[in-house]
Image (cartoon, rainbow, N blue to C red):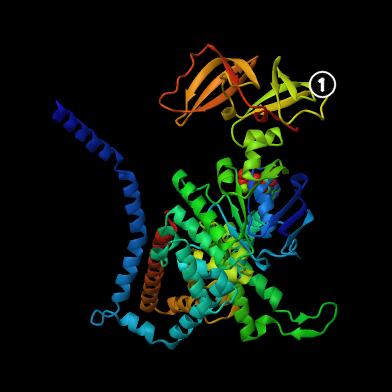
Amino acid sequence: MASSKDRKVAEMKFINRLRKFPFFAWLWFLLGALYFVLPLLATFEFSLSWDPAVPFKAYQRAFEDVRFWRSFIASNVFAIITIIACIILVVPTAYWIRLRLPQARRIVEFITLMPFVVPAIILVFGLIRVYSTPFTIPFTDIVFMKPLTQFKAGTNILIVAGYMVLAMPYMYRSVDTGMRTVDILTLTEAAQSLGASWFVIITRVILPNIRSALLSGALLTFAIVVGEVILASFLGVNAFGPYLFLLGQHRAYEPAALSFVSFLLTWIAMGMIQLVTGGQNQTAGGH
Amino acid sequence: MSYLSLANITKQFGDTVVVDNFNLEIGKGEFVSFLGPSGCGKTTTLRMVAGFETPTSGKILLDGADITDKAPNQRNVGMIFQSYALFPNMTVAQNIGFGLKVRKEADSVTKQRVSEMISLINLEAHANKYPYQLSGGQQQRVSLARALAIRPQVLLLDEPLSALDAKIRVSLRSEIRSIQKTLGITAIFVTHDQEEALSISDRIVVMNAGEMEQVGTPFEIYNFPKTRFVANFVGSLNTADAEVVDPAKGLVSVDGVQFTSAEGTKQRNKGDKIKVAIRPERFSFATQQHKDNVVEATIENITFLGSVVRIQIKIGNTSFNMDTFNNPFLELPKIGSKQQVTCSKEAVLVLDE
Ligand SMILES: Nc1ncnc2c1ncn2[C@@H]1O[C@H](COP(=O)(O)OP(=O)(O)OP(=O)(O)O)[C@@H](O)[C@H]1O
Ligand SMILES: [Mg+2]
């Protein structure tokens, strides 16, 4: 009696598992994956096909070009500066909003969404228009600064500022989410009663506790800055984006090689996010 | 004489008065509890001492200095939170040393103090663990050590035990009390648990709706509650409407049954409507020796509560609870029977209200 009952239960379980097996979910997932992977594979394959005798010729050529290194390094430096500037701006802002101004949250969230509403091309024209006139002391004609667009450091400042706008939604959201997972208010009060100043609280208590959120924001920012074309080309900055774009118009194989490499870099970055945030879950969870 | 003094403290949030004219003098090394129902302003008062809120009016003096408007990080006050509030990114030792580091104490001093504190709370084996690796009770001990490490002038505890389970709650509260006594530190302890307040405090401030109802030792609060609120909130209590019969003799009548109250009712007039209160454990069955307040009661119900047996009796038209200690040879009366019960004159409390 018992055994036939057991068998029935087992059968039911098997059928249930079949029913539960998300067949269509998997189908769509596979189709989606193919949609991403196929072009990438094709690009890779194409990048190898320049000279069958030397399979990585396209990569060699691409890496030999000194302009590649210049623009690539420049973009990396821009990315790092953008990330640091963003952290300095966003972390105290998000912190203060969580702590004292929860009403302002919606407004700030809306502002950070600007780059989705205003296309980069409009942003760059706006920047150029505003900052190509000299700075004067208000109500006089005394010029105290050349237009930012007319010298290199000025342009660099402009482009970093532009990148910050583009990175803002990612940075703000990840930092804000990071702060939601720890009890910012009580930790702040605990630190205050132990004698900590605002600076100490932010650098020693808040930042370390949102580091995985910071990292994911930073990596996204990195990817955006390194691949950005419009701001850089209109401001005339030799960044990696415009270089790749130019290369694509004149060469066949090297751009394929470089895009494959940048894809790889992005994926490694994503993997790192997963790794770091996964590790954080362990420390943050459980009581 | 007083070390911490709260003088005429009032706190308003918008139009609502949350703390109303709060006056309290706390001596050095004293352990004072704020006891009251949810929302009565305990936390708000504590946060004003910590500096997280500023009183709308009134002054806070600590060791003679006016700290009313000082920033929290400029006061030397330790705070313990219900949620422990340990820094998740730091080990036990780093958490405890945080306050000293912030104060730029020498490394040797910090190290010494941290190990002192860790042995004070008996967590030597856990010094290098992170908070998430500790139990709730251990985390709260770390937070106690962290607050004490800076040698605060006052220790503030806001329901530090509420998140713990019953056994640990009891053992940790005696640990807190013994550490507080050893260090001779002045402490304010917020709780809404009357047993906790009664067992741990030198003095209790009973609060209700932003006002102080009564301040006194646990003994005074329990045995001589001044108001109906205190009497009801602390311990269980029978209250009844009564009428003054003879102010000089302290004679009152509950539904026509007369009781004598030792407190007397001299300030009242004959015929005044008042409230009296009698604790359940003050009733007993009357014997030949009893003279005062021997009255007839009907047994309505009997409930077994472990160490205590609660008997519901009816005197006149009013129901009272009567508690007697349980013992295996206890002979309980039949439900519905009439019995002579008694209570002493001192047991009949006349409530202010
Ligand atoms: N920041 C604030 N703004 C407005 N009202 C507040 C604020 N903080 C507290 N209150 C109000 O003040 C009253 C007292 O709050 P408080 O936290 O002091 O109560 P409590 O006695 O600690 O209660 P509990 O036992 O629930 O912790 C409550 O009615 C609360 O809603
Ligand atoms: Mg409270």
- In percent of the image, x 73 and y 79: which residue is there? A133
Query: Can you see residue B62?
Result: yes
- In percent of the image, x 51 and y 67: which residue is there? B96
Q: Is residue B335 left or right of residue A38?
A: right
Q: Check the image and name the residue furthest to the top.
A: B337
Q: Check the image and name the residue furthest to the front.
A: B289
- In percent of the image, x 74 and y 22: which residue is there? B251
Q: Check the image and name the residue furthest to the right.
A: A139
Up-down: is A200 above or below B171? below
Up-down: is B34 above or below A174? above
Pointer 1 residue: B270
Where does the image place residue B41, in percent across and percent down from the top left?
68, 46
Where does the image place residue A269, in percent across and percent down from the top left?
41, 69
Instruction: Please state which of residues B78 and A201 is positioned toward the viewer in this rendering.
Output: B78
Split into 4 quadrants, where in the image is the N terminus of chain A?
top left
Instruction: Please state which of residues A123 and A245 is positioned toward the viewer in this rendering.
Output: A123
Where does the image place residue A207, in percent across and percent down from the top left?
53, 68
Where does the image place residue A67, in percent across and percent down from the top left?
46, 86
Query: What amino acid is found at the position of numbered circle 1 in the picture?
Result: Lys
Instruction: Please state which of residues A231 and A1 is positioned toward the viewer in this rendering.
Output: A1
Query: Can you see residue B86?
Result: no
Up-down: is B227 above or below B296? below
* Picture mark count: 1
Q: Is residue B71 left or right of residue A98?
A: right
Q: Residues within 10 Å of mark 1 (few under 14, many from 20)?
A: some
State the SS at label 1. loop
Host chain of mark 1: B
